[in-house]
Image: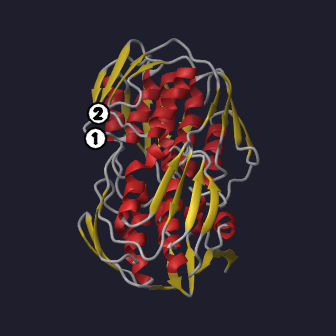
Amino acid sequence: MTVRSYHSSVEALTVIGGSRLSGSVQVTGAKNSVLKLMAASLLAEGTTTITNVPDIVDVEIMSELLRRLDCDVQQEPQSGTVTITVPERPHYRADYDLVRKMRASICVLGPLLSRCGEADVALPGGDNIGSRGLDLHIDGLQRMGAHVVNEHGYLIATAQRLQGANIWLDFPSVGATETLIMAAVRAQGVTVIDNAAREPEIVDICLMLVAMGAHIEGIGTSTISIEGVESLHPVEHRVVPDRIVAGTWAVAAAITGGDITVEGINPEHLRIALDKLHTAGAEVTAADGAFRVTMEGRPKAVDIVTLPYPGFPTDLQPQYIALNSIADGAALVTENLFEARFRFVRELARLGADVRTDGHHALIRGKAALSGAPVEATDIRAGAGLVLAGLVAEGRTEIYGVSHIDRGYAGLTEQLCALGAEVERISV
């Protein structure tokens, strides 16, 4: 199996600004959940089936990583299905050449340690949005009795059998919460994680693990209690819809003065983000499993403060900066999670946006119009923000670094064109 190239120097998206987007889009499964669900399959011998899987590069990378761990992985992009057959004892070494491409690869650490008693996982790469240390992962595993060292670029963890422990997270880290839950489900005794992350993707992982036979209480709260079991069994599980992709489409409607219905999503997962669009002047109508965003005229500037769920998601911050760049008035955006998330505003400035940053604050003064120019995406969400800005920039915008966008958005070009945008993927 050949993994699509992560670094692409020959492809770009061209966007001709000025189109009003209208129509409906269907949201597939969440990138931030499916990769962890694939890792969780390592906890049970046999075949696990995951449905509603997005056709994105990160799924291909994770599939290849699981194959290196001696699993058989079958992908069916047309049906959105991945089947993973896990052997009696998987390999336990996750090599650098794949882990460096995707930070989510670290999520195999907990399952491998719990299942095999050892795990060698290369320190991860991924998006260039700031430091995201693994201290909380390591500290939690050590509290459960693991011996963890960092040698030659690998985290090497060993434990004859993990033991239940009381763990307090200094920060509600999504990654650490996932690692510790997946490690604890087969540990001996009870593990309690306080100040745990509460994202819908965490809930999704817990629901799959419960279906596999795990004993987990407090799902969706900041205190999660896991009673370890001797073994788990494979299941079929449907991935929770991608709230970040859904939020991106919501902003696309608002920024272009459009009318888009987003289907296959729980609006409650985007309550604050949608409320911000209402403040910006959009009409937002929520329904069962869908919402509609309609905007007439120029949006109003809205202040944003990113926080862990249920706060405003950091993964939507670039998209809302793009919205504010053409809004009426000035807005202050405060980034509390990733210190390098503002790097993308340098590219946005090439389109004429007026954005000034100071530490973890960005002041955006809205302009009546942006102008097309060549720009480069430095991470997944920066790419989405630049596409949105290109939709309202005068003339032609060329967006390089398309490989980043491919890691989080399936069929973006086709969906944009179906909504009325002038977007083309080109080789240069």
- Image quarter in which the C terminus is found: bottom right
Identify the residue at horizontal 48%, vertical 64% (top origin).
251
Tell me if 130 is positioned left or right of 214 in this view. left
Q: Which residue position holds label 1? A: 171
Q: Can residue 159 be spotted in the picture?
A: yes
Residue 195: image tag: 2
Residue at (51% x, 32% y) in the render: 205
Q: Is residue 46 above or below residue 57?
A: above
Which of 24/377 is in front? 24
Q: In the rendered structure, which disc, 1 or 2, sits on the residue that comes first in sequence? A: 1
| 10 Å crowding of disc 1: few (<14), some (14-19), many (20+) | some
Q: Is 259 drawn above or below residue 173 in the view shown?
A: below
Q: Report the disc number at residue 227.
A: none
As shown in the figure, which amino acid type bears the numbered disc 1? Phe
Residue 267 placement (x, y as % from top left): 48, 46
Give the amino acid type for the residue marked by disc 2 in the picture: Asn
Residue 83 occupies quadrant: top right
**Mark 1 falls on what kind of element?**
loop
